[in-house]
Amino acid sequence: MDSNIVTRFAPSPTGFLHIGGARTALFNWLLARHFGGKFLLRIEDTDRERSTRKAVDAILDGLLWLGINWDDEPIFQSSRLNYHAELAEKLVKEGKAYRCYCTPDELEAMREEAKNRGLSPKYNGMWRDRDPRDAPSGVKPVIRLKAPLEGETTLRDIVQGEITVSNDQLDDMILVRSDGTPTFMLSVVADDHDMGVTHVIRGDDHLTNTFRHMQIFNAFGWNIPQYGHIPLIHGPDGAKLSKRHGALGINAYRDMGYLPEAVCNCLLRLGWSHGNDEIISRDQAVEWFTADNLGKSASRLDFSKLANLNGHYMRIADNDRLLEELLRIIGDVSEERQRRLMIGMNGLKQRAKTMLELRDIASIYVDDFIPIRIDADSREILHKIFLKLESIQDWSEENLDKKLREFSAEIGISFGKIAQYLRNVLAGKKITPSIFEMLVAFGKNESMSRIKAVLW
């Protein structure tokens, strides 16, 4: 492989960017970037009833969120349908395709006959060699490929190895429907050829399609791309991934609080490996990725592993970026509360595995303060703590830690108890970042104000 490699991702805009589609895009993107080639995007929007601009935007936004950028402008397959139909006419003129005038009833009879004989239902070639002058009136024909009737078709798959299919298992597929619109089979082959696609990594559910595509490539005399078919993603229980396993759209993973680099790292490990490495940065992925390490067996999406990966990437993430993402989730807050979040971010992000967990923990710096009620004994101890804090000038974590521990020894009360008093008063919660982080994030004035509100 070299810099002439061209890969592509070709989603249908009939819904969100599926997690499986995102993995396919990632693998093709990495293969192109590793070899310095091109990664192209094609929107297969030939299903005019189900394809929407909203779905196109969701796919593009999902790819960009994952950091998967494409070369050149996206190609919309719908703009090329007339050209695709002309290609089919060319094959008819060359005797490599023909018009079929079978009625729905005739096709149904073929299926029943094959079924009764224990064969897979397929077209029997009724119009393959008939004179078009025999065509019945009032029937709009389809155009079918004259597929080879004998021999075998062999696919040298870069993932699965060599696979051979007997040609008599494949019938004369439809290239153009009776309404004049090209089929998926023809359009994909024509676009892959014109885009110069050299390598295609996709799910193994397309394996049968690939043999049909190869026949169309051969009919035109075009070079066939190298294909690699990867097993579909399975859920934690080993069954094919479905809605019951959780959210399937990339946008949903963002809404669940995952960072794009964690999602990409997780997807990378679903069917590709580099030794025992689990955490793989984007730069490492580009450097290491080849089709040689793509696996033949299905991988399971493990949400606990994804959460752990996400926790790692959150801990090393830039605080400004985390604040921006946090504000996207919680909405606008005052500059003072943003300041608290930034000061406390180092401590907050150590305790969260997702942005939603970060949001919940960070609520102590965002929510309005509600003073708690305390009993007389607690009030006496808290008053002593208040006086000690009031006397401290150097309001840094290190100095607050030192002074409060000294104070604990002086008054004979365990530091843990003092910390719990402050935790309850400052945040109203038993589980928080360290009290020193909170004291610094709130600042001296706000911290003292909150203690006063409880004492008086």
Image (cartoon, rainbow, N blue to C red):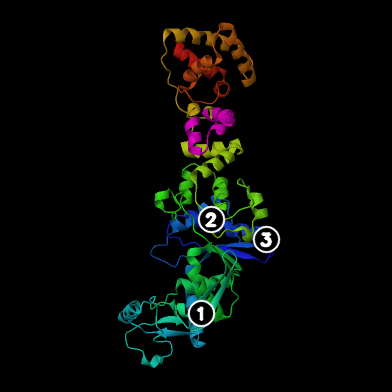
Tell me, yes or no, whether the two marked residues, 1 and 3, touch with CB atoms within 8 Å: no
Badge 3 amino acid: Phe
Can you give x and y, in whole percent of width and height, for residue 53 in the image? Answer: 44, 58
According to the image, label 2 marks what residue? 23
| Magenta-colored segment: predominant secondary structure | helix
SS label for mark 2: helix
Mark earlier in primary sequence (1, 2)? 2
Left or right, 279 with respect to 102, comes to: right
Can you give x and y, in whole percent of width and height, for residue 266 in the image? Answer: 55, 49
Disc 2: CA contacts within 10 A as few (<14), some (14-19) or many (>=20)? many
Does residue 206 appear in the picture of this structure? yes
Mark earlier in primary sequence (2, 3)? 2
* Residue 26 quadrant: bottom right
Q: Residue at x 48, y 26 (%)?
A: 364
Q: Is residue 115 above or below residue 161?
A: below
> Magenta residues, as a range?
337-361
According to the image, label 1 marks what residue? 87
